[in-house]
Image: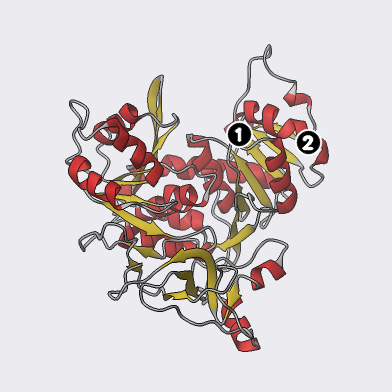
Amino acid sequence: MDAADRSRGTRPRPTTGPLNIAYEAVDRHLGTPRADQVAVRWLRPLADPVSLTYAELAASAGRFADVLTGLGVRPGTRVCVLLGRCPDLYTVIVGAWKAGCVVVPLFPAFGPEPVRERITLAEAEVVVTTAALHRRRVAPVRAALGSLRHVLLTDTEPAASAEPAASEAGVVDLPAAMAVADPRFEAVRTDSEDVALLHFTSGTTGRPKGAIHVHGAVLAHRETAARALDLRGGDIYWCTADPGWVTGMSYGVIAPLALGATVISDQAEFDARRWYEILSAERVAVWYTAPTALRMLRRRGDELPAGCDLSHLRLVASVGEPLDAAVVRWGEQVLGRPVHDTWWQTETGAIMIAADPAEPVRPGSMGRPLPDVEATVLARGPDGRARVTDGAVEPAGTDEVGELALRAGWPSMFRGYWGDPARYEKAFAGGWYLSGDLARRDADGYY
């Protein structure tokens, strides 16, 4: 890779000027009719739903930001969020951005060792979690977490079942602290290129990679959700992905709030009957889920449960793995809508290739690149990856399987791997980001 190509490979076209995701996703709705609209509606298996309006979310996020600054937490500090799907999750994430901090989502099903590894790699000073998750995931490795200064607990456990977490150094009773905090906290002035998110990959093949994303990526989240998911302000929207992963963050938190939608958040695990009930009772308009979940629903049968009304469901989309043609056709037959595929990665930050909502779905195809996204398929070498010769790559032929690549420079492109610049450089060649995924492109430009 020559100097010019290296520059194109690692320096995205930046958005410029002050920008903060918390403002774009929540605060900008204040003073508008959207302020009193439900932002998040949390569903629980054995209790009534809990709803937060945009105004209430802004106030609770402001209190959390005030708590952070009161603890001496400064902008740029990494804040690990180890929470399940609950209202506190949205308060903490938005509040951390208000305080200018970097959000590090952690999947709550991780064991203590993956949690320790990610907190250590991120050099995080703050972890926000529940008392139960703290006891099971953080406390066993706390002695090895040299950077960790504060553990903020969103709840408490009965004394009989809990360890004395409150007596542990640095543990904060978050509800008590927020009760006396100021809800009018104004978002810290951050630049569009300031780091907002540190997303760790699964780490199934070696050390987890921490993909760096900036505040300016919110513009791509909002635009791609509108284009690829047909998501609009006022929609009832359900993304089933956990916010501990990039899909649940980009399209379960950021994009729908930035567009002014109402986000459905379900605490329960997958259950076919429950999912149909949610789609029907909550009148979901746009549903973003995974092919595995759709295949599990398909195994339930080709008829909707009695009383299930999906007439309001405008679009169904999937992400995370290849979507087989049979599921697309099943969606059209049973759900009343074909399933639209989308392709993107932790590193891309936003949807790159998708089936256009305005065009007929081609079963078996994930669609075409979104506007301003340039994609290609590169010829493979003996190792199965793109063949790179003296920094140059070559395109594969039509309908030839090769490595899917993107022209570097899209706005939501990751800005690096945390603490590993060499690994970042290896992800690019000839001005292209090498995705590692295999694909083929047909004569009509569909992937």
**Quadrant (top left/top right/bottom left/bottom right) for the N terminus:** bottom right
Amino acid identity at mark 2: Arg
In this image, 56 relative to 115: left or right?
A: left
First in sequence: mark 2 vs mark 1:
2
User: Residue drawn 75% across and 21% down?
Assistant: 164
Outermost residue toward the top in this view = 160
Q: Which of 143 and 171 is in front in this view?
A: 143
Q: Nearer the viewer, residue 252 or 111?
A: 111
Amino acid identity at mark 1: Val
Q: Which mark is residue 142?
A: 2
Residue 18 showing in the rendered view: no
**Quadrant (top left/top right/bottom left/bottom right) for the C terminus:** bottom left
Q: Quadrant of residue 386?
A: bottom right
Where residue 427 appears, as percent x and y from the top left, is 61, 70
User: Residue drawn 33% across and 28% down?
Assistant: 274
Query: Where does label 1 land, which residue?
Result: 180
In this image, 23 relative to 323: left or right?
A: right
Q: Where is 355 relative to 400, above or below? A: above
Where residue 156 appears, as percent x and y from the top left, is 63, 23
User: Residue drawn 68% across and 41% down?
Assistant: 115
Residue depth check, mark 2 versus mark 1: number of the one nearer the observer: 2
Q: Which mark is residue 158?
A: none
Q: Quadrant of residue 41?
A: top left
Residue 335 showing in the rendered view: yes
